[in-house]
């Protein structure tokens, strides 16, 4: 009688290989999810940024460029954005889901030479998540 099958040693080697591949692949997958979520946040922010720029042109400054004023939308939520607030032109986005703990702030500064607004961004995570901060800085380039 001839039996065929795998030995215990062969099964253990297969399990170790699968564990190593999972350990390598999981962080990369999580990074891709965070980048996709950050792109959603960026796309959500665009209409607010445009509205603040129009408000600044119409008013001559960003004072009173707030949610609900001068065509700036009220707060909006998406799968990855918990809230968006606009106060005196400063746009603050709070993340959720894959972006939980992330706060992205966009601050406008009038550029009198070119007649437009220059934007500075700030990415903060609580607790500190260096990977998420880096992804935020890479996606929100101005």
Image (tube, rainbow, N blue to C red):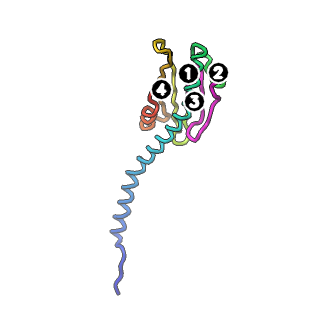
Magenta region, residue range: 71-92
Do the numbered discs 3 and 1 sit on residues whose CB atoms are within 8 Å?
no
Where is mark 2, residue-wise?
70
Local secondary structure at mark 3: helix
86 magenta-colored: yes
Please state if 124 lies on the left or on the right of 64 as rendered.
left
52 or 138: nearer the viewer: 52
Q: Which residue is mark 4?
A: 121
Q: Which residue is mark 1?
A: 53
Earlier sequence position, callout 3 versus callout 2: 3
- Crowd around label 2: few <14 · some 14–19 · many ≥20 (10 Å): some
Dividing the picture into quadrants, the one containing residue 56 is top right
Quadrant in the picture for the N terminus = bottom left
Q: Residue 130 location in percent, x, y?
A: 42, 36
Which mark lies nearer to you, 2 or 4?
Answer: 2
* Magenta stretch encompasses residue 73: yes
Q: CA distance from mark 2 to mark 1?
A: 10 Å
Ranked by sequence position, the earlier of labels 3 and 1 is: 3
Q: Is residue 35 above or below residue 59?
A: below
**Which one is in front in this view, the residue at disc 4 or the one at disc 3?**
3
């Amino acid at each position: 009688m001839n039996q065929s099958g795998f030995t215990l040693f062969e099964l253990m080697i297969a399990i170790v290989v699968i564990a190593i591949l999972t350990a390598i692949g999981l962080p990369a997958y999580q990074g891709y999810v965070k980048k996709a979520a950050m792109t959603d946040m960026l796309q959500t922010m665009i209409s607010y940024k445009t509205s603040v720029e129009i408000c600044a042109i119409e008013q001559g400054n960003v004072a009173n460029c707030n949610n609900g004023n001068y065509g700036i939308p009220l707060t909006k939520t998406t799968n990855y954005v918990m809230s968006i607030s606009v106060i005196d032109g400063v746009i603050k986005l709070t993340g959720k889901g894959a972006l939980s703990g992330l706060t992205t702030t966009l601050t406008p500064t009038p550029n009198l030479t070119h007649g437009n607004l220059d934007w500075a961004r700030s990415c903060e995570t609580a607790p500190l998540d260096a990977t998420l901060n880096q992804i935020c800085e890479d996606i929100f380039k101005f």
